[in-house]
Amino acid sequence: MLSDWMTSSEALAVLGTQPQTLYANVSRGRIRSKKDPADSRRSLYSGEDVRRLAGRGTGRRKAETVASEAIRWGDPILPSAISTVADGRLYYRGRDVVQLAGRATLEDVAALLWQGRAVKLANGEPGSGEPLEAAFLLLAGRAAHDMPSLGRSTAVLKREAESVLGTLVGAITGGRTGAIHERAATAWGKPEATDAIRKALVLLADHELNASAFAARVTASTGAALSAAALSGLCTLTGPLHGGAAAGVSALVGAVERDGAERAVRDWLAQARPLPTFGHRLYPQGDIRAQVLLEALPVPPAFSALSAVAERVVGERPNVDFALAAMTAAYGLPGDAPLQLFAMARCVGWLAHALEQVEGGELIRPRAHYVGEAMEQR
């Protein structure tokens, strides 16, 4: 998730504006900025944001052009009161996630995001097969039979959200009892990782209108069951550009252990490959979630060495996917533990978005900009 960065003079040349206008756009969140790793006295500006803003000034554009750009890391396209990233911090309904990670559980976050009663999950059904396979099967079974979400009271839907979360957590942790982070630690036989798991779950619960949250909202907007919305989110999460991103760092860490961090990074970049799990477009100064989680871990030496070299050479800090991979290595968790953690945590966010979408009552139905063969003339 690396971005190109410009100096102020380069940005002003592209924008064709005065410095005051550049700084105003930064303060309004239209252009991301970060400190220059080579000179802390000056700032760098996102080339992508600068070029996008410059394009807006070239004349009035068609609505479809604006919409097409908006859906690719552009301006928000749906209003939401659930979470936001502002000034390098993540907030759940106005609460700083760093503060929540210090003491809260995922159940606490669910109550906050759903704006409901205290969440206490039933034991859940363990399911069969591997954890994620069981989660897919059980959610799919529910989606085929659960009632539609439209026309039902908010209180009833919140109770159903609790049940859907319980289904997914039960599938992944084997139907154990206790708080969700305790169930996961027990399922993996790693009690020493219990608090780190708790922090990770809190940090991962929601992240604005990410791909899986958007998928869940689209599903909920049709009136489908909450379990169907959660299933849509889970399907989207598994992609290597989303919840599966942590798996991409294993080959690089292996090279670090074999050849040392300096050579591993150099060889990786020489193949025109961006370093996986470094940088995040919403956190130019570094992913706050990764910082919190890494501070709670006995980070393995290979990960520490890689992080130091990457920040010096590339100018990007590790993101939360890196922290999850480091956590997996530190405690000897299952290889797909990052994806399992993401699924349990983000299910809380998917359900929050589904509830919010149902309350709004609008169908999400974008139009397509047709670029295919010429249409036959009648």
Image (cartoon, grey):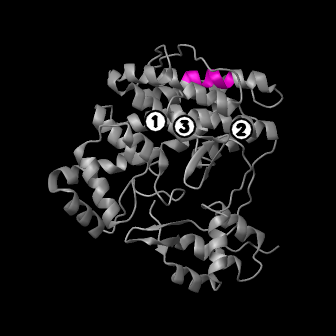
The local crowd at label 1, few if under 14, some if 14 to 19, many if 20 or more residues have their Cα within 10 Å, is: many
- Distance from Cα at disc 1 to Cα at disc 3: 13 Å
State the predominant SS element of the stretch in magenta.
Answer: helix
The answer to whether residue 171 of the structure is visible from this angle is yes
| CB-based contact (under 8 Å), mark 2 and mark 1 | no
Residue 342 x %, y % = 48, 37
Of the residues shown, which amino acid type is indicated by label 3?
Answer: Gln
Q: Which of the two labelled residues, at mark 3 and mark 2, occupies the earlier sequence position? A: 3
- Camera-nearest residue between 144 and 231: 231
Magenta stretch: give its range: 160-167
Hey, what amino acid is under mark 2? Answer: Ala
Q: Which residue is mark 1?
A: 200
Residue displayed at 23% across by 48% down: 302
Q: Earlier in the sequence, mark 1 or mark 3?
A: 3
Helix, strand or loop at mark 2: helix
| Quadrant assignment, res 190 | top left
Image height of 125 relative to 345, above or below? above
Label 1, secondary structure: give it.
helix
Whether residue 277 sits left or right of residue 368 in the image: it is left
Tag 2 residue: 220
For mark 3, give the secondary structure: helix
